[in-house]
């Protein structure tokens, strides 16, 4: 079986957002962050990364705004609770980031960041970790399932870093 969703990567990106894996709705629709309660595209607009709120099916337009997308688990889909450690490709993500060298790699939620770092806990914000010159950031998940942890201030910060401000 192939990748659930294609990477949206390229040279010159300000930020690459990385989730754990495509959710069930995203996998069914073939579009990143397509769940009805997900605030990803609204947030990108609210923090100034896109000039309008894109629809999930427009995800391929994001590189024009300096934004890329990938997941730590490219061949799995579903809720985070249903994913196993074997679903994540840490070395593959590192290789992608080394190749495209965005200003910032931003994990959309803590689980992907913890799996990537091999850490039991991780905080929100800019981490000490880098991939070459790429800075690593953890933002609260835009998933509707994570509403209790939502804080848009971190998204404003990653937008600022992605622009080099």
Image (cartoon, rainbow, N blue to C red):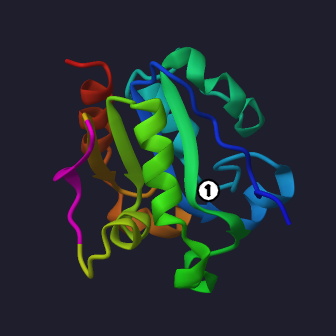
Q: Which residue is mark 1?
A: 37
From what the image shows, is residue 50 above or below residue 122? above
Residue 131 location, x and y as percent? 30, 45
Secondary structure of residue under mark 1: loop
Residue 22 coordinates in the image, percent (x, y):
67, 60
Indicate left or right for 108 with 160 as reference.
right
At 69% from the left and 56% from the top, the residue drawn is 35
Residue drawn at (85%, 59%) of the image? 28
91 magenta-colored: no
Q: Quadrant of residue 71?
A: bottom right
Q: Position of residue 12 (x, y in %)?
A: 45, 18
Residue 52 seen: no
> Which residue of the protein is positioned furthest toward the left in this rendering?
128
- Which quadrant of the rendered structure holds the C terminus? top left
Could you say which is closer to the camera, residue 42 or residue 104? 104
Which residue is drawn at the image coordinates 58% and 22% (left, top)?
A: 63
SS majority, magenta: strand
Of the pair 88 and 151, the residue shown nearer to us: 88
Q: Does residue 10 appear left or right of residue 159 in this picture?
A: right
On-image quarter of the N terminus: bottom right
Front residue of 151/65: it is 65
Image vertical order of residue 3 relative to residue 8, above or below: below
Residue range in magenta is 122-132
């Amino acid at each position: 079986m192939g990748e659930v969703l294609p990477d949206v990567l390229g040279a010159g990106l300000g930020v690459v957002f990385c989730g754990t894996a495509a959710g069930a709705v995203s996998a069914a629709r073939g579009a990143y962050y397509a769940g009805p309660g997900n605030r990803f595209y609204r947030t990108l607009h609210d923090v100034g990364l896109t000039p309008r709120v894109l629809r999930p099916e427009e995800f391929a337009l994001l590189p024009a705004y300096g934004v890329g997308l990938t997941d730590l688990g490219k061949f799995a889909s579903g809720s985070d609770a249903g994913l196993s450690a074997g679903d994540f490709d840490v070395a593959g993500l590192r290789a992608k980031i080394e190749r495209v060298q965005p200003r910032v790699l931003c994990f959309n939620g803590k689980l992907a960041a913890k799996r990537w770092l091999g850490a039991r806990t991780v905080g929100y914000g800019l981490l000490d970790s880098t991939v070459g010159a790429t800075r690593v950031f953890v933002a609260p998940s835009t998933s509707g399932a994570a509403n209790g942890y939502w804080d848009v201030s971190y998204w404003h910060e990653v937008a600022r870093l992605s622009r080099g401000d």
